[in-house]
Amino acid sequence: MSHIFLTPANRVEHELVVNKSRFIAWIAPATDREQAMALLDEARFAYPDARHHCWAYVLGNPTNAASAAANDGGEPSGTAGKPILNVIQHKGIGNIMVVVIRYFGGIKLGAGGLVRAYSGATQQAVELLDLVEQRPLETVQVLLAYPQEPLIRRWIDNHAAALIDADYGVEIVMRLQLEKSLRPQLEDWLAGRDGCRLLDPE
């Protein structure tokens, strides 16, 4: 199973009008429930007089989400939160929060009409998103002999890894952050150099 998935790179807002009811979709990146709920609070603050604030989120990889939740925001059960969630799950997007704010236009839409409206507002907003690939990262510790330092820095740059910190003692101990898929390459690189190896995590 691939650990790479798509996440929003930006926030979007999109409005859909159905039979005079306004459906305003907000989408933003969220990596935890706290961030997701912050967007909901922001939407309630921005549209305090709206009748409904419905939402759904998927945290982590959508194929095996760490957490997914939905709320109908006072609409009939299953007509708002679940349709929003279905759209983002079908699109395979993770670390995402969607809030759809509804202003009632005076014409009842019925259960099917609500499902179509919430799905449609979410779908149209998702199409406006810039999506980026999310690749799982890990932190490793590397033991180095001093002559290898410029070489490992070049490896870090070439592989879009990040140097978190370095401890200069008798030898150098570096903490790196890199994509999990790159670990075997790093191990091979270290194995070919004297005095270099991965350290076990503390």
Image: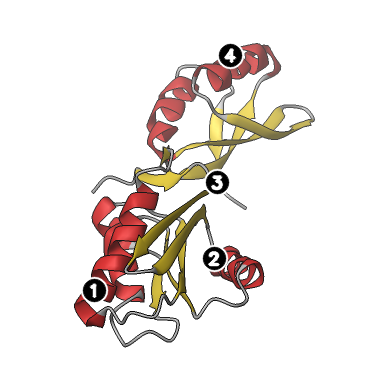
Real-space Cα separation, disc 3 to disc 4, in angstroms: 23 Å
> Alpha-carbon distance for marks 2 and 4?
38 Å
- Is there any visible trace of residue 194 in the rendered image? no
Q: Are marks 2 and 3 in contact (CB under 8 Å)?
A: no
* Residue found at x 59% / y 23%: 195
Q: Where is residue 31 in the image (x, y as percent from the top left)?
A: 52, 57
Residue mark closest to the camera, 2 vs 4: 2
For mark 2, what is the residue?
36
In whole angstroms, how far apart are the C-alphas of marks 2 and 1?
A: 26 Å
Which one is nearer the viewer's eye here, 59 or 55? 55
How many numbered callouts? 4
| Element on which disc 2 rests | helix
Q: Mark 4 points at which residue?
A: 154
Q: What element carries label 1?
A: helix
The amino acid type found where label 1 is placed reads Gly
Q: Tag 3 or tag 1, which sits nearer the N-term?
A: 1
Task: Find the distance from the CA under tag 2 to the CA under tag 3.
Answer: 35 Å
User: Residue at position x 35%, y 58% from top?
Assistant: 122
Q: Residue at coordinates 54% horizontally, 30% vertically from top-left?
A: 197
- Looking at the image, the residue that sits furthest to the right is 169
* Residue picked out by circle 1: 113
Query: Residue 126 at what x, y percent from top left?
Result: 37, 49
Label ID, residue 200 = 3
